[in-house]
Amino acid sequence: MEEIDTSSNPVRQGQWFVVQTLSNKEPAAKRYIDRYISENELDDYVFEVLVPEQTVSEVKHGKKTQRKRKLYPGYIFIHCRLYDEENKVVQKVWYFINGADGVIGFAGGKSPAPLKDAEIDRILNQVAESEGKEVPKVQYEVGEEVKITDGPFLNLSGRIDEIDAERGKLKISVSIFGRFTPVELEYWQVERLTDED
């Protein structure tokens, strides 16, 4: 993500605002705004549109799949100059963003407040931390009973003894020939036991 240097160019100063979107329209709103910034001569007003996401993995029908999950469903974050030097709303920015495909409007109504530095820093850190990482769709707990769905211990059940979230691994005690044996598996190789199991 490119850092915007606002110290040398006062025209590029801006703040981060929260914009509400229709359900599942966050990427479409981002694409629309990104595409039409230059056509509407807003390069000096709208700098970045952010849709914070993380990669989620799950296993369905024996196949591991990945998809993107939004960290803030129904919202996008826009770095822009919404207010001028006299603290009045810049009308062309206001109407452009509110008129974008999939956008409901700025959070805060007619006079939205920008995010505090600590708030946007936390969001940007979340995005940076989730880049290149994969998180399981299901979160497990120590002591939970699971069924193994892949590998040499297929269809056996076991109890979670340790969780290594950083590596995406679980240490599971599995009963083999009447003795409990520790086995290390990846998140996607197990599933929660249901009542029918």
Image (spheres, grey):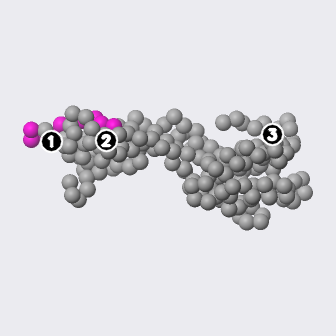
Q: Which residue is mark 3?
A: 6
Image quarter where the C terminus lies is bottom left
Is 22 inside the magenta-drawn segment? Answer: no
The three-letter code of the residue at mark 1 reads Ser
Whole-percent x and y of residue 86?
Answer: 90, 57
Decide which of tag 2 and tag 3 comes sooner along the chain. 3
Q: Residue at x 27, y 38 (%)?
A: 150
Nearer to us of marks 1 and 2 is: 2
- The residue shown at (75%, 38%) is 4
Q: Which residue is mark 2?
A: 62
Residue 110 at least partly seen: yes
**Residue at the left extreme of this rendering:** 178
Residue type at tag 2 = Gly
Toward which corner of the image does residue 10 lie, by quadrant? top right
Name the outermost residue toward the bottom.
Answer: 109
Give the Cα distance between marks 3 and 1: 61 Å
How far apart are the two marked residues, 2 and 3, measured between alpha carbons? 50 Å
Residue 46: percent from left, percent from top: 78, 46
Q: Is residue 143 left or right of residue 64?
A: left
The answer to the question of whether label 1 and label 2 lie on touching residues, with beta carbons closer than 8 A, is: no
The location of residue 17, given as percent across then percent down, is 71, 54
Under mark 3, the amino acid is Thr
**Magenta highlight range:** 177-188
Of badges 2 and 3, the one in the foreground is 2
Q: Residues within 10 Å of mark 3 (few under 14, many from 20)?
A: few
